[in-house]
Image (tube, rainbow, N blue to C red):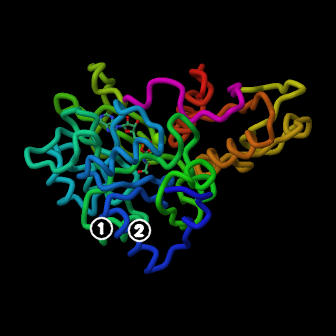
């Protein structure tokens, strides 16, 4: 694993998918598109493959990974899926919903992948490339988002290449990921569904199936990766901006306005004010404004409804005070 990584970038075709599956089966680390964001995959049953993945991403070992499987039946071999989770799986899988459930008695997934917890996060992705890789590999695939730990998730292969190209085995370039925001993560505490991470399936759609989500009562079932600064660009973020400082870049939302005219650099998440469009643009625009080199990115207010809950969650984490980087 060395070199610039350019030779590791491959377009998607049948032979690239077979190669990805083969590299995964022999314990390698492969980045691929999913319907949410790019994932960084490894054989979830192999301690050494998962260790290589944690190392490449510089992820702390206490933060567990989502295990991606082909279908509900495969998920049930790894975890014990309670009734309300089953209803959600039937409605949203394949798709952008992750269910955190108790590890099953015959779970073959390495304890490293689940960070020693007695639960496992499971997802059946709908992206045809991801589905084909999982089916051909024939193993559960542990895959966090394909970015360095704490940084902005990757929605294009070039983002993955910039951050991880030198330290992983293969990157499949399947274009921009359609949703652009990570999966919604739900846990089940004493049978009640708890939202651990808002994501690409809005809360309202989940509540239509199983009723109101509960607030988490247990501290231990929080998503370990979701507590502090995360999704962070280099620049500082200032949220709910109504005015603009002289050295600030602007991340706008909604129809063009006077703020945008005055900005030294500005991008608009969705001029039409559509949350789906804003979600799909969020990470790429944060990266682009960051590359501009400004010290602060001012972000206009975004409604809290629907996908807005997840967009605002990512923005708040990106704006949170952070530990100094190495
Ligand atoms: O859309 C997605 O979910 C993408 C694609 C690649 O599938 N993956 C992704 O993975 O965002 P990652 O590792 O960046 O975020 C997974 C989140 C982390 O916050 C982790 O702490 C949480 O899920 N998680 C995983 N297993 C868990 C568990 N057993 N209990 C609680 N939280 C868990
Ligand atoms: Mg992530």
Image quadrant of ligand 1?
top left
Q: Is residue 123 visible?
A: no
Tell which of 265 and 215 is nearer to you: 265
Query: Residue 226 magenta-drawn?
Result: yes
Residue 199: image location, x then y, percent: 46, 42
Picture quadrant of residue 262: top right
Quadrant that contains the C terminus:
top right
Picture quadrant of residue 8: bottom right
Q: Is residue 35 found left or right of 85 in the rendered image? A: right
The residue drawn where x is 72% and y is 31% is 235
- Mark closest to the chain's N terminus, 2 or 1: 2
Tell which of 61 and 89 is nearer to you: 61
Q: Is residue 151 visible?
A: yes
Q: Around disc 2, counting alpha carbons within 10 Å, would you say few (fewer than 14), some (14 to 19), or many (20 or more)? A: many
Q: Looking at mark 1, is its residue's CB closer than 8 Å to ligand 1?
A: no
Query: Residue 104 magenta-drawn?
Result: no
Q: Which residues are magenta?
A: 224-239
- The residue indicated by pointer 1 is 137
Residue 20: which numbered mark, if any?
2
Number of labels in the image equals 2
Q: Label 2 to label 1, Cα distance in Å? A: 8 Å
The residue drawn where x is 33% and y is 47% is 50
Tell which of 257 and 101 is nearer to you: 101
Contact (Cβ within 8 Å) of mark 2 with mark 1:
yes
Q: Around disc 1, counting alpha carbons within 10 Å, would you say few (fewer than 14), some (14 to 19), or many (20 or more)? A: many
Farthest bottom residue in view: 14
Residue 54: image location, x then y, percent: 40, 42
Eyeballing the image, is 310 above or below 23? Answer: above
For numbered disc 2, what is the local secondary structure?
Answer: helix
Q: Is residue 170 found left or right of 301 in the rendered image? A: left
């Amino acid at each position: 694993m060395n070199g610039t990584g350019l030779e590791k970038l491959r377009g998607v075709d049948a032979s690239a998918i077979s190669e990805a599956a083969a590299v995964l089966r022999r314990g390698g680390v492969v980045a691929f598109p999913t319907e949410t964001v790019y994932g960084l995959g490894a054989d979830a049953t192999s301690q050494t493959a998962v260790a290589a993945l944690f190392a490449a991403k510089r992820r702390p070992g206490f933060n567990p990974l989502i295990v991606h499987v082909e279908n509900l039946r495969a998920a049930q071999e790894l975890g014990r899926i309670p009734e309300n989770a089953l209803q959600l799986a039937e409605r949203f899988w394949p798709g952008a919903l992750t269910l955190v459930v108790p590890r099953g008695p015959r779970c073959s997934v390495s304890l490293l992948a689940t960070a020693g917890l007695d639960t496992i996060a499971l997802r059946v992705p709908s992206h045809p490339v991801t589905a084909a890789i999982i089916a051909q590999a024939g193993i559960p695939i542990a895959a966090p988002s394909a970015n360095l730990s704490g940084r902005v998730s990757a929605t294009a292969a070039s983002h993955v290449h910039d951050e991880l190209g030198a330290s992983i085995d293969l990157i499949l370039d399947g274009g921009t990921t359609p949703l652009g925001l990570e999966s919604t993560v739900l846990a089940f505490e004493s049978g009640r569904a708890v939202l651990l991470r808002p994501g690409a399936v809005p809360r309202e759609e989940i509540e239509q199936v199983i009723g109101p989500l509960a607030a988490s009562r247990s501290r231990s079932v929080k998503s370990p990766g979701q507590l502090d600064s995360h999704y962070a660009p280099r620049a500082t973020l200032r949220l709910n901006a109504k005015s603009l400082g002289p050295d600030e870049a602007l991340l706008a939302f909604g129809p063009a306005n006077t703020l945008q005219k005055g900005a030294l650099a500005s991008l608009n998440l969705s001029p039409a004010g559509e949350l789906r469009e804003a979600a799909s643009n969020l990470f790429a625009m944060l990266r682009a404004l960051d590359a501009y080199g400004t010290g602060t990115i001012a972000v206009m207010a975004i409604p809290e409804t629907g996908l807005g809950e997840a967009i605002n969650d990512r923005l708040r984490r990106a704006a949170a005070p952070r530990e100094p980087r190495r």
